[in-house]
Amino acid sequence: MTGLVKRNLWLYFEDRSGVFFSLLGALIAFVLYIIFLKHNMATSWDNVPYKNELLDKWLIGGTLATTAITTTGNAVSTAVTDRENGRLTDLMMTDVHSETIQAAYAVNGIIVGTIMQIVMLISLSVYFWVTDGIHFDWTLIQQLLAIAVLNATIWTMFNVLIQTFIHKMSTLGTVQSLIGTAAGFFVGVYLPIGMLPHSASHLIKWTPAPYSASLYRRVLMAKSLKIAFKSRTDRIEFERIMGINISIHGMNAYLTDTIILSACALTFAIFVGLLARRSQMSAVQVH
């Protein structure tokens, strides 16, 4: 499997335009924030101290979650390419098991997703340090790395599952465009979840996307929130509106977010495992 993973990693990073477009959803969110959203949001929270620091770190959390969704999708798209051009058929003719092939795609996605989230974290931290004087707390790096791996895992499993049913790169391009566009809304980076209509925010809460961003935001913004808000009531209201603490049946702890994401990752992985053989065999039959 090591050889397959190395090959998949090389294919991803060798395609520089593909790497750029896999980051496009996150970059669009960043640009929209800089040009439009930041001013409006800062005006809404004009009476809050350190609002620039809070909003910048809020944006970083949402952008990292979006990065996890889109880059893992691009990384595991090798599976669709292999099905379409017949390489998967050649692999199936060897002694490599279908589960091993599927696992190689998944491991590749997790590695790529983790790396790209870290790259994006460093890039945004440097940008906001230069423009707003926001200093990143590097003591948080271990927590953030763990969150990056968790997010990379869940969205890799999600994308592998989705791509199990796709056999053409043209179809995949359309699906990835839809996912990339939707990601910004579902992680609450285009518009804070608390500002959405109740029905829309309720729907989003039943997907793993907002919890990916919430985990990042809890860690990145913890110290800033304590300094900015002396009133617990005001802080809770800010966290609710900005999608930092997402409550389901009264549960809104850091551990709850982790459990939800882990459960979703396990669920997706089970379905991927169940469908692995079917996906590979259908590719062989086509060719």
Image: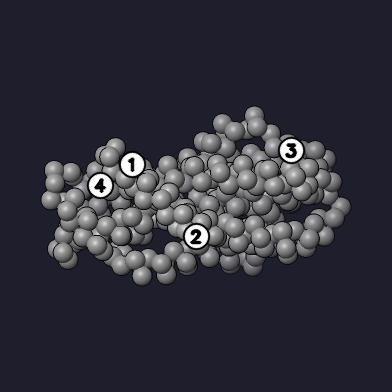
The span from disc 1 to disc 3 (Cα, nearest Å) is 36 Å
Mark count: 4
**Residue 10: percent from the left, percent from the top?**
37, 46
The span from disc 2 to disc 3 (Cα, nearest Å) is 29 Å
The span from disc 1 to disc 2 (Cα, nearest Å) is 21 Å
Q: Residue at x 69, y 37 (%)?
A: 136
Which residue corresponds to mark 1? Answer: 6
| SS class, disc 2 | helix
The span from disc 1 to disc 4 (Cα, nearest Å) is 12 Å
Which residue corresponds to mark 2? Answer: 21
Quadrant position of residue 26: bottom right
First in residue order: circle 4 vs circle 2: 2
**Residue 268: percent from the left, percent from the top?**
37, 51
The span from disc 3 to disc 4 (Cα, nearest Å) is 43 Å
Contact (Cβ within 8 Å) of mark 2 with mark 3: no
Dot in front, 1 or 3: 1
Which residue corresponds to mark 4? Answer: 101
Which residue corresponds to mark 3? Answer: 135
Amino acid at pointer 3: His
First in residue order: circle 3 vs circle 4: 4
28 displayed left or right of 276: right
